[in-house]
Amino acid sequence: MSAGQPGVGPTPSAPWTRAGTAPGHDSWTRALRDWTARTVPPGQLLPDRQPAYVRSWIYVFGVLTIAALVLVVASGVALAVGGSAWWHVSSLGHFVNSVHLWSVEVFFAAMVVHLWGMFWMAAWRGRRTVTWMTGVIAFLASIGTAFTGYLSQSNFDSQWISTQAKDGLNSIGFGAWFNVLNPGQMLLWHVVLLPLAVGVIAVLHIVLVRRHGVVPPIAEEGEPS
Amino acid sequence: MFHTALVQAGPGSYVHWGWFSVSLTNLVIVATMLVVFVLALVVPFGHSTRESGTDEPPGASTDETREAREARTTEGRDGP
Amino acid sequence: MSPLTRPPRTPHRPQRPATPDSHGYPTRPYDLVKEFVYALVAVTVLVLALAAIFSSPDEKSITLTGWAQAAPGDVVATAAGELAGSTASAGYGAPYNHAAEGQKLLGVPLQKLGGVRLPVSSADLVLQPLAGVRGSQALSSALAQWRAAGATQQTGWASAYADALTKAPGGDPAKVAAGDFGPVPQLASSFLDLARSGGLEGALTSSGSFYGGDQTRALLLLSDGAYLEDTARAQNLGGDQWGMMNETGNYPGQPWMWLYTFWYQVPPFSTSDNADAQVWGLMMVLTLGLLFVPLIPGLRAIPRLVPVHRLIWRDWYRSRHA
């Protein structure tokens, strides 16, 4: 969708350009508003209808992944309130830690089933390549986040996992900057940097799904789909 | 052929299959995922009886203008 | 363009028809917010139940005191090894020291390229805590004797002692055969005493400052010994035991690491000196493959060739034929 010609009102290809407003006009606010409106057209962010072909239980695994992520973050926030040693000394803290662990297991399980579904639907079709890629990157970022979580447990697991993982990371030179033997660094990556990355990528992924819509069925041979 | 041994090593139960070894818990998790995946594919999605309204023609899903609908082109070309 | 007016495909055309716009299809009502709330409730109930029933593991860390109590011979052997420069950390290379080239991937010395940014002296893992001990004449003399000797002499003493320990029955320092070990037996024995007393705890992390937080040196010392690995292997956590996927006890591990740990179980990686770099390189290639599936011919055709989608969209296909 192009921005239209300067000085011209709404056109079929630029329906959101207000009459008399030219792109290149000095309102950055209007430019940003126009850009967001083009990125996800009005009504598409939270539509109350879906294409008729969206009728299978496989479609619920995306939202299940999001729901599990919400629980991971919520339980993580609760753990942060008590501090990194809280769960060792408090039974409530230990329960919250268990919620955190199991929500992560459900998160990965749902995400992988979602991935399987998206693969067999060839969901990258119709300009959805970037949607697929953001999904894969979200998966990778989640693995990294989970990994730093294991390092932040301050128990035997952390000791073993860190001393093992260092060999892998050192072998390719990353370990010089990303020191898995340093819990102070790993905890901050786990609580701040990586969740931010996962969150941003997840939002991008969801925005792209809303922008392009749910991928249509694969065309059967000899027929348009 | 293969023989499977369920090893109770105090610390945890593991299933050995040749050189392949997996904890019982992980195996249950992965097996459950596969079962859930297959169920998701085959179990009928029965919401149509609960939701009111028949399928509407294209474009009824949003508030977008007719111009907006026409403005959108078919998307992308997919190779083999 | 409406899908209904597109010309039919001819057999000669190599390209498939464009995927139609998803907004050009009939729609039905669907409540996304309700779906999300249902999903959140379902996942919350499931997770709370799993957490309540199965809990989560929390095996206590191995303290240096605990190590000294459980495996004193290992502590002594490790101390001797650090002084001899024969431990894993002493011969590691980047990022800790320059002792080795490190691993290479396709001939590129990636490990070395990272640089020695976390310098650690393995001998100082033993000598620095000992230097802070007061009240032991034997230890002070031993330290003085060690510092006065040249590097070759130091290595000679320590290597001989480390060797003798491996030959002693049960690795017991008391049963070591006689030999020229210089001050090393005294240093190693004092080190063990320090560990037993709890004085070693934190000595390698705070190192003169008040706040610690970086366990690099303490973990390198611990992993130079055998006790940490023995404890892990007893729980199937070893690298050649598919350990990356596993967890202590019967708790769920990280099943999504299955492919990463798989390569370590099979040749050539299982016997390679550069296994870590090679496995990482291979996993990077496979990861890029996953990332770029939509662009890889053949791979992206699999969903069409194995029509799982016929199950997913069976209602839709049926309605089209009706």
Image: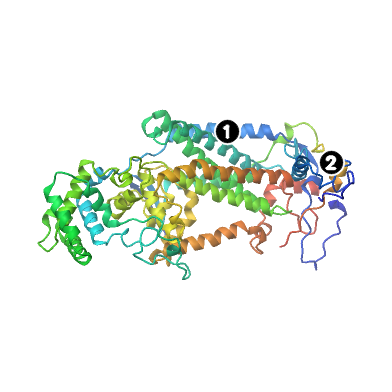
- Quick check: A65 left or right of C262? right
| Residue A178 pos. (x, y %) | 45, 52
Specify whether residue A135 is in view. yes
Element class at badge 2: loop
What residue sits right under mark 1 in the picture?
A: C42
A221 shown above or below B50: below
Q: Nearer the viewer, residue A59 or A93?
A: A93
- Quick check: C208 left or right of A21? left
- Have a look at marks 2 and 1 and say if they share a chain: no
Tell me the crowding category of disc 2: few under 14, some 14 to 19, or many 20 or more residues within 10 angstroms, Cα based: some
The circle on residue C217 is none
| Residue C31 pos. (x, y %) | 71, 33
Which residue is depicted at the point 51% across and 48% down? A143
Quarter holding residue B63: top right
Q: Nearer the viewer, residue A116 or A212?
A: A212
| Chain of residue at mark 2 | B
Q: Nearer the viewer, residue A151 or A131?
A: A151
- Quick check: A74 left or right of C253? right
What residue sits right under mark 2 in the picture?
A: B57
CB atoms of marks 2 and 1 within 8 Å: no
Tell me the crowding category of disc 1: few under 14, some 14 to 19, or many 20 or more residues within 10 angstroms, Cα based: some
Kind of residue at badge 2: Pro
Kind of residue at badge 1: Ala
Element class at badge 1: helix
| Residue A169 pos. (x, y %) | 44, 56
Q: Nearer the viewer, residue A33 or A75?
A: A33
- Quick check: C36 left or right of A89? right
